[in-house]
Amino acid sequence: MPALRGFCGPTYGSQSRIASPERCINWYPEIIEVPKAEYPIALYPTPGVTSFGTMTAAPCRGMFEELDRLFAAGGGNLFEGTAVGGAFTSRGTLAVDLNPATFCSSGDFGGQMFVTSGDLGYIFTFGTNVLTQPVNDVTMGGYIDGYFVALDVTTSTLRISALADGATWTQTAQRSAGSDRWVSLFVSHREIWLFGSKTSEVWYDAGTSPFPFMLYPGSYMEVGCAAAFSVASLDNSVVWLGRDKGGRCVVYRAEGYRPQRISNHAIEFALQGYTTVSDTIGWAYQDQGHSFYVLTFPTENATWVYDAATQLWHERLYWNIATARYQAYRPMFHAYAYNRHLVGDRDGFTVYEMAIDQYSDVDSDAIRRLRRGPIIERDRRWLNWKEVEFLFEPGIGLQSGQGSTPTVQFRYSRNRGFTWSNTRQLSAGAVGNYDARVLFRSMGRGRGFVPEVVVTDPVPWRLIGARGDFELGAV
């Protein structure tokens, strides 16, 4: 049986389903880095989660690690979590609005952490564990060269603290380079990225007096930001959900001060069909050599993930068993603390550890992984399908309980995805059964064949490729 080239791949649902109907949900593509691999791309399972600790207020609105301490905003509280036992202690109350909280720190130099929440700015002093609220009208903040900086989006004003003292705020600057208001602030590489709705610019520490920061020459960009909290640091560069005066919903990654498009037409077709994108949250993390940018659209119930290592996109979605529908990914906000990837629950009280050796979703629910492959056709001729085999890593079943006989569900379309067969299922083999095959036979005939597999058992589903045998029929 010849390999079905391209079966393992990213999500790419084109405007026309007969151009490309591909979906990749809760798997991520990894390029096999050896020459002439028969299966050049494998699909590996996105990480599951296990409970790390529980906050007494919800939902999670932001997370941060500094000086080997973990902090989280849960509902209207600032919590600190311990490394052992995941015990969370409230360090004070925070104002709440519809925006996430933001965190930054002056580290050992200033001994302070700056938190924005509910349009107010707070200073947490590491040495005393005291939380104060010295500044108003700030939506998000950052730290650069001894100063805390914050943005008032209502008046398009940049505020800065005194040097090494977040308790004092006296200096401000307003936007003048562009007519659109600043909507987002992000500090990267000792520079302040200030995004407008249509244009953006970068400021740096020029050492001037009385206001030390100014626009960096040549940094003005004719691209703005469509979602204030979509900005993140990915693989040593800035990424965000962008827009300009001509339209919205292109994902950009900065190369120097030049925004480079990293979304593709299929992703943009999906995003530009959304009614609401202003509430989009972006965060990034690195695992197994992959740097992932996670974009969640809460109103639209969607989460898209870009992998900087492969430049491919996949989807991460929570399967609601009660409604039998996918929803946006529940983990949101990330901190790498205590040698763990920790994430909050956008709908609950729990902070989770995220890891590739965990195979359940939040609330211990099943992760429903789906791969819909590309269309298989040959010169518009009828294809008479004898069999299709999916190459899952065998012998991965658990010793007992769900997953002891991991099951693959399979359905197919013979008309490029317009209609679908009934679902069939086969076991992928019990633990230690390394000769197990997932082989389906007798799929009938069609001009455009689309295979789709779904798995839900809590095992490490690694999908290497697919093979197929068919006979060419008449034109």
Image (tube, helix red, strand yellow):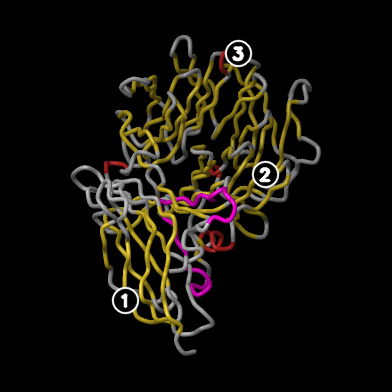
Disc 3 to disc 1, C-alpha distance: 69 Å
User: x, y percentage for residue 282?
Assistant: 51, 43
Question: Which residues make up the magenta segment?
Answer: 16-37
Residue 20 placement (x, y as % from top left): 51, 69
- Which amino acid type corresponds to the residue marked 2 in the rendered image? Ala
Q: Which residue is mark 1?
A: 442
Spot the residue most to the top: 128
The answer to if 22 sits in the magenta stretch is yes
Rendering coords of residue 413 (x, y %) = 38, 74
| Residue 254: mark | 2
Q: Nearer the viewer, residue 165 or 239?
A: 239
Mark linked to residue 109: 3
- Distance from Cα at disc 2 to Cα at disc 1: 50 Å
Dots 3, 1 in contact, CB < 8 A = no
Closer to the camera in the image, 105 or 32:
32
Identity of the amino acid at label 3? Phe
Quarter occupied by residue 150: top right
User: In the image, is residue 474 part of the stretch drawn in magenta?
Assistant: no
> Is 406 rendered above or below residue 183?
below
Nearer-the-camera pick, 404 or 298? 404
Instruction: Describe residue 446's horizontal placement relative to residue 36 as left or right.
Output: left
Numbered circles on residues, count: 3
Residue occupying the point 54% across, 59% down? 267
**Label 2's element?**
strand
Amino acid type shown at disc 1: Ser
Q: Earlier in the sequence, mark 3 or mark 1?
A: 3
Residue at 54%, 26% (x, y): give it.
104
From the top left corner, tell me how far across and down residue 152 is, in percent. Answer: 59, 35
Mark 1 neighbour density, 10 Å: few (under 14) some (14–19) many (20 or more):
few
Residue 297 falls left or right of residue 165: left
